Image (tube, rainbow, N blue to C red):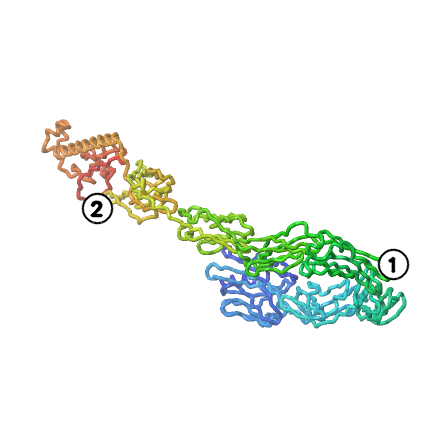
């Protein structure tokens, strides 16, 4: 057998055809199933991929257990030749000389695995292990194909740039070169700015990237990182300097004054013009005034500018390396008289008890002349209080004490003149009371961090002064037109008024509006809710109407945990109420205090609801009063039961009828030299099988599908929703009660059988004693023939079991009822050799004893069974 296996193994190494299969980039020959072995043997092929690194170690597995015989061979990619490497034919491993080209090869002890140290690139290929198991019985052959891929680490790459100083907008390429490394290799180009910020510019499997549009942002340090499955190496940094510019210059004017026509300056000021343009290398700057060159350099300063210096100033930026340039022109205007018209306004003064008229006309030199006209005569009437003085100024500002001295909706005009202007300019303004009343309201920020009390009195000129006054120093000073009092959420005083006051200079008394804030109030329908186990119960929580909006109503369960929508809890809520439904309530888990809580910016409120989950009452006891088979087949049992105290202890929802298998019915056995016996095989108690009765009013039930040969016990258990009552005592079903007609017929048949037996016994007695009572014998059987009067004192005349005589069956054994066997005398005239064989009775076994002692006649009565 071993010789056959060895021959088979080397045959596979030398003559087996191959099928080439692609693995990565190499083709490996894979032996086909042309191995000729015993048909009862089993050949199993298994493939495995193993990766190794040049110079390192690798292990090639040949099954999980040590085979009886194994052979390792090697196939170079692209070749059909299979070369043996190592084998073990039962006398230890033998390493071939060829293995030296594959590295330092060794066999791992207690296995067929091969360990290769200092792995060379030449070991890349297909290793085949032929393993033979159970060679002394029915061998099993395994082919393990181990595809070894030898990888080479990448060397340190170096970066090449097509142009280290490209011009912005041009095209360039970067190449990441390396000496060696097994693919696939991934390349990553990193860009580092002057500030040290490193970003990934590109990455991929190609070692070359093209930059089609170089810009100034590409300036910086570059390096490439080469990575394969073995290692990762980074190149040295290489600086890339992008040549660009100059951009369009930016001109900054100091002092910075912008007009519709450009920049402006006041006469005799020092004006500085700064020109900056992005460029590499740095730009050269030339200044032009009205197309005439006036200065070279980035900053052009004019000391004590005059009106004649008004004009166009241009900055020319030049890049001498690229021989490029850019230019920008601005317009600078030197103002002396003011432009435009004056502006008028009315403002409150003296804590909103007086009016102040303002007229503004900026620019110009000297300042323009401003005079007020209009309803000043009415406002100039002597005040009732001597302390109030009229302060009229012919200028930009006029102070008018109001206090009902200035009528509502008064018109005031400001006329301005300037020596540089041919015509005067004027403006006008009105003073009036806001048309509506102050408005107060409160709102909460989106993040519920602050409560905002807002008060506004829109309109009017000048604007009214608005301020808040609240309890505990929660106030806010005056602001014009509107005011917001910011309170932290929950810091407001419940039930305390917050008053907003609004004061206008044209009114003696201040107007006001008031807000009274209150905390929310929660209500519930029932504070204590009681249910039975298994029910769904709903707990209610309502929010009484309030000025401030409240947050969502939150429920906490009996453990104090915030209730979420789960299979146990269901939440229905609106902005005004929230109902919590507890599903399938249980006494131990769900009973307790549930809390409903909410809050607003003033305070919070909560209310407790007590949930009492009660167990269902214990159902009343039930007793089986009848358990009886309803037919001779014994496959259906009728059950009837009664309930104790049903009217007082109601509450049950049904019954469980249970039965178990107690024992088998007795079975009849028979054998040689033994009488007929009845035995009973007992078995242990079985599991109870349940039938569910869902109607609590049922008192009878028929259990069907029973096994006739099995004895059962039955019991009844009352149940309600969650409580199971006590089981009734187990009861074994009784046999069915038959009607009178079968009983009478049976009695008659039994009597007939009894009479027949007595008659047969009497006849047997007369025959056996015919010599003692010849007359009785002759009367019944008649006179005997003279030839029959012979001596019958021979043994064969006796009714001996096993003699020449036989036993005759009366009526045949096939008829129901008793079977009676009577003796039949034999005479020498009727005796034959064949008649010497005894005829056994139909119900009696032949004798087994070795003696010839005669045996008395046995009469067997067989009653018809059901």
Tell me: residue 610, above or below residue 74: above
* Residue 165 x/y as whole percent: 78, 69
Q: Residue 62's spot in the image, x, y percent? A: 53, 64
Quick one: 284 or 109, which is closer to the camera?
284
Position of 743 with respect to 32 (left or right) is: left
Q: Is residue 173 left or right of residue 126?
A: right
| Residue position for label 2 | 849
Quadrant of the rendered structure where residue 276 is? bottom right
Image depth: mark 1 or mark 2 in front: 1
Q: Nearer the viewer, residue 428 or 277?
A: 428
Q: Name the secondary structure under disc 2.
A: loop
Residue farthest to the left? 772
Towards the viewer: 653 or 47: 653
* Up-down relation of residue 296 to residue 444 (above or below): below
Label 1 element class: loop
- Residues at marks 1 and 2, CA–CA distance in whole angstroms: 169 Å
> Would you place residue 569 above or below residue 280 in this image?
above
- Decide if residue 253 is in sight here: yes
**Label 1 crowd bin: few (<14), some (14–19), many (20+), radius 10 Å:** few
Going from the N terminus, do you reach mark 1 or mark 2 first? 1
Tell me if mark 2 has few (under 14), some (14-19) or many (20+) residues whose alpha carbon lies within 10 angstroms of its own. Answer: few
The residue identified by callout 1 is: 422
Residue 582 in the image: state x and y as whole percent.
Answer: 45, 49
| Residue 441, label in figure | none
Q: Position of residue 39 (x, y in %)?
A: 51, 55
Q: Quadrant of the C terminus?
A: top left
| Residue at left offset 69%, top offset 64% | 203
Would residue 445 be seen by someone viewing this image from the given angle?
Answer: no
Left-right relation of 340 to 12: right
């Amino acid at each position: 057998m071993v010789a056959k296996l060895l021959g088979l193994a080397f045959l596979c190494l030398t003559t087996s055809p191959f099928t080439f299969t692609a693995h990565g980039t190499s083709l490996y020959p894979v032996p086909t199933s042309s191995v000729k072995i015993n048909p009862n043997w089993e050949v199993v092929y298994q493939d495995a991929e193993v990766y190794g690194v040049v110079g390192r170690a690798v292990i090639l597995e040949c099954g999980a257990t040590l085979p009886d015989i194994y052979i390792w061979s090697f196939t170079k990619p692209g070749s059909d030749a299979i070369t043996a490497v190592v084998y073990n034919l039962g006398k230890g491993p033998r390493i071939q000389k060829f293995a030296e080209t594959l590295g330092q090869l060794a066999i791992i002890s207690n296995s067929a695995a091969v360990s290769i140290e200092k792995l060379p690139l030449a070991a890349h290929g297909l290793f085949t292990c032929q393993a033979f198991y159970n060679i002394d019985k029915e061998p099993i052959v395994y082919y393990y194909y181990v595809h070894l891929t030898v990888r080479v680490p990448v060397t340190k790459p170096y970066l090449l740039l097509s142009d280290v100083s490209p011009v912005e907008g041009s095209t360039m390429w970067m190449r990441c070169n390396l000496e060696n490394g097994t693919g696939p290799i991934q390349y990553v180009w990193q860009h580092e700015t002057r500030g040290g910020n490193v970003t990934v510019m590109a990455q991929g499997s190609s070692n070359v990237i093209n930059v089609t549009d170089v810009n100034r942002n590409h300036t910086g340090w570059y390096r490439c990182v080469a990575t394969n499955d073995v290692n990762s190496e980074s190149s040295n940094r290489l600086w890339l300097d992008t040549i660009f510019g100059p951009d369009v210059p930016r001109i900054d004017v100091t002092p910075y004054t912008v007009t519709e026509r450009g920049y402006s300056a006041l006469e005799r000021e020092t004006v500085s013009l700064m020109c900056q343009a992005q460029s590499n290398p740095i730009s050269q700057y030339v200044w032009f005034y009205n197309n005439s060159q006036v200065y070279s350099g980035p900053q052009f300063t004019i000391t004590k500018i005059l009106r004649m210096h008004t004009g166009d100033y241009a900055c020319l930026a030049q890049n001498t390396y690229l021989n490029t340039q850019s230019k920008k022109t601005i317009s600078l205007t030197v103002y002396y008289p003011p432009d435009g018209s004056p502006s008028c306004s009315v403002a409150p003064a003296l804590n909103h008890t007086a009016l102040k008229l303002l007229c503004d006309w900026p620019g110009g030199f000297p300042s323009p002349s401003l005079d007020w006209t209009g309803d000043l005569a009415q406002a100039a009437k002597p005040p009732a209080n001597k302390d109030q003085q009229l302060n009229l100024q012919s200028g930009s500002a006029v102070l008018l004490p109001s206090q009902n001295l200035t009528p509502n909706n008064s018109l005031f005009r400001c006329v301005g003149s300037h020596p540089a202007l041919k015509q005067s300019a004027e403006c006008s303004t009105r003073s009036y009371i806001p048309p509506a009343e102050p408005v107060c309201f409160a709102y909460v920020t989106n993040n519920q961090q602050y409560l905002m009390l807002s008060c506004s009195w829109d309109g009017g000129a000048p604007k009214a002064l608005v301020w808040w006054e609240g309890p505990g120093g929660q106030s806010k000073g005056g602001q014009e037109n509107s005011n917001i009092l910011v309170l932290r959420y929950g810091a407001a005083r419940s039930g305390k008024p917050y008053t907003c006051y609004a004061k206008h200079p044209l009114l003696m008394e201040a107007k006001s509006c008031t807000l009274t804030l209150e905390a929310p109030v929660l209500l519930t329908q029932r504070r204590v809710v009681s249910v039975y186990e298994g029910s769904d119960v709903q707990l209610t929580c309502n929010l009484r109407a309030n000025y401030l909006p409240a947050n969502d109503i939150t429920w906490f369960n009996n453990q104090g945990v915030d209730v979420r929508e789960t299979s146990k809890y269901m939440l229905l809520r609106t902005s005004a109420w929230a109902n919590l439904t507890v599903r399938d309530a249980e006494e131990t888990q769900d009973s307790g205090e549930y809390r409903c809580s909410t809050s607003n910016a003033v305070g919070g409120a909560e209310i407790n609801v007590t949930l009492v989950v009660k167990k269902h009452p214990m159902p009343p006891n039930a007793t089986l009063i009848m358990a009886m088979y309803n037919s001779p087949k014994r496959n259906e049992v009728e059950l009837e039961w009664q309930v104790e105290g049903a009217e007082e202890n109601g509450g049950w929802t049904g019954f469980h009828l249970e039965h178990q298998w107690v024992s088998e019915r007795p079975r009849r056995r028979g054998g040689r030299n033994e009488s007929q016996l009845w035995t009973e095989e007992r078995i242990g108690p079985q599991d109870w099988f349940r039938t569910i009765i869902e109607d609590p009013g049922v008192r009878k039930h028929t259990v069907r599908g029973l096994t006739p040969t099995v004895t059962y016990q039955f019991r009844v258990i009352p149940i309600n929703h969650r409580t199971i009552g006590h089981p009734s005592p187990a009861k074994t079903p009784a046999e069915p009660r038959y009607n009178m007609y079968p009983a009478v017929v049976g009695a008659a048949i039994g009597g007939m059988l009894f009479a027949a037996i007595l008659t047969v016994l009497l006849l047997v007695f007369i025959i056996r004693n015919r010599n003692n009572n010849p007359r009785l014998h002759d009367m019944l059987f008649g006179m005997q023939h003279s030839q029959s009067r012979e001596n019958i004192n021979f043994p064969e005349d006796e009714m001996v079991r096993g003699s020449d005589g036989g036993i005759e069956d009366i009526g045949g054994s096939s008829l129901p009822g008793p079977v009676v066997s009577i003796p039949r005398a034999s005479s020498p005239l009727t005796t034959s050799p064949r008649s010497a064989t005894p005829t056994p009775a139909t119900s009696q076994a032949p004798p087994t004893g070795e003696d010839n002692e005669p045996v008395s006649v046995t009469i067997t009565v067989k009653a018809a069974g059901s």
